[in-house]
Amino acid sequence: MKIKTDLRDKLYYNKFKYRIDFNIIGANYIKWAKDIYDFIRLAQNTSSYRTLDPIELTDRYVDQVNIIINWYKDNKEHISMRTDYTSCAFFSNDLVLLSELGGKIDYHVTYGQAEILGEPDVIYLKNPKHNYRIYFRERNVTEDFRTEFKEFLDRYNKTLFPCPSLQRWVSMDITKKTSYSHWRHKWLQPHFFIEYDSESTLTIVKLIFDKYLGKIYKLEYR
């Protein structure tokens, strides 16, 4: 088992040392469902209020979902679950328990371990609008990534606040590309940052974009 070390200022959700995450269609339904029959009902729901696209309920898929739901129900007292559309993560202080799920499902899973670094560095501002700021690493990314990133920011626009340059970058019109803009839209820049207020928000961002994240700062009045 390969475990990635996550350098953090606190444990996951201030409580858990380990995590397991993987991608599976209908992750939100798995979290809401009481059992596999309830999951199928949710997945087949045609209401205008549904939040996910229709799901193809193959035998293999239903079997995998059933394993996850039953494992989650049996161990709720010792774990916490977080989902975001197709991303699914479980957190616990029992790595053996998490690896039990990883050994039962066919999806590619990754494991993480929180390593506490203490309080984040502080940036002093004249009038900080939020409590924390996280920067990004410079990365060559695809257009699909940029589209996914924009949708993510739109979805969490009440809790995530991108800097103006990042907001412009995700909103660039690629149909009007020059050689310069073509280069610009392919690169995630290290001066891009997102601000947020709650420490729990960081876990949501890490669930999707962990390998793109850089240094975290606490914002305080100068």
Image (tube, helix red, strand yellow):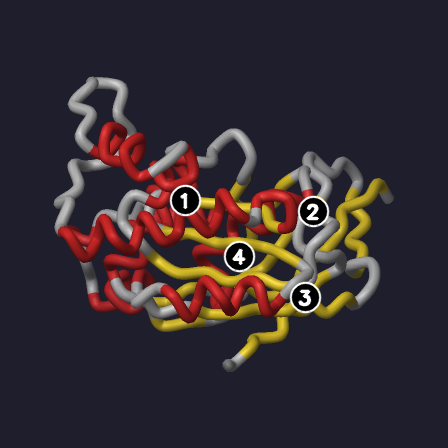
Crowdedness near tag 3: few (<14), some (14–19) or many (≥20) residues, C-alpha within 10 Å: some
Q: Earlier in the sequence, mark 4 or mark 2?
A: 2
Q: Residues within 10 Å of mark 4 (few under 14, many from 20)?
A: few
The residue pinned by badge 3 equals 114
Residue reaching furthest to the bottom: 2
**Nearer to us in this view, 106 or 210:** 106
**Residue tagged by mark 4?**
206
Identify residue type, mark 4.
Answer: Lys
Q: Secondary structure at mark 3?
A: strand
Q: Which residue is mark 2?
A: 132
Of labels 1 and 4, earlier in sequence is 1
Picture residue at 46% right of the left edge, 59% below the top: 209
Residues at discs 3 and 4 in contact (Cβ within 8 Å): no
Q: Are marks 1 and 3 in contact (CB under 8 Å)?
A: no
Give the residue number, with chain letter if any, for mark 1: 84
At horizontal 34% and vertical 42% (from top left) the residue drawn is: 151
Residue at mark 3 to residue at mark 4: CA–CA distance: 12 Å
Q: Quadrant of the C terminus?
A: top right
Amino acid on which disc 1 is placed: Asp
Q: How far, Cα to Cα, is label 3 from label 2?
A: 19 Å
Question: Position of 82 compared to 198: left or right?
Answer: left
* Distance from Cα at disc 4 to Cα at disc 2: 14 Å
Q: Secondary structure at mark 4?
A: helix
The quadrant in which residue 119 appears is: bottom right
Circle nearer the N terminus (1, 2): 1
Q: Nearer the viewer, mark 3 or mark 2?
A: 3
Residue 142 sits in which quadrant? bottom left
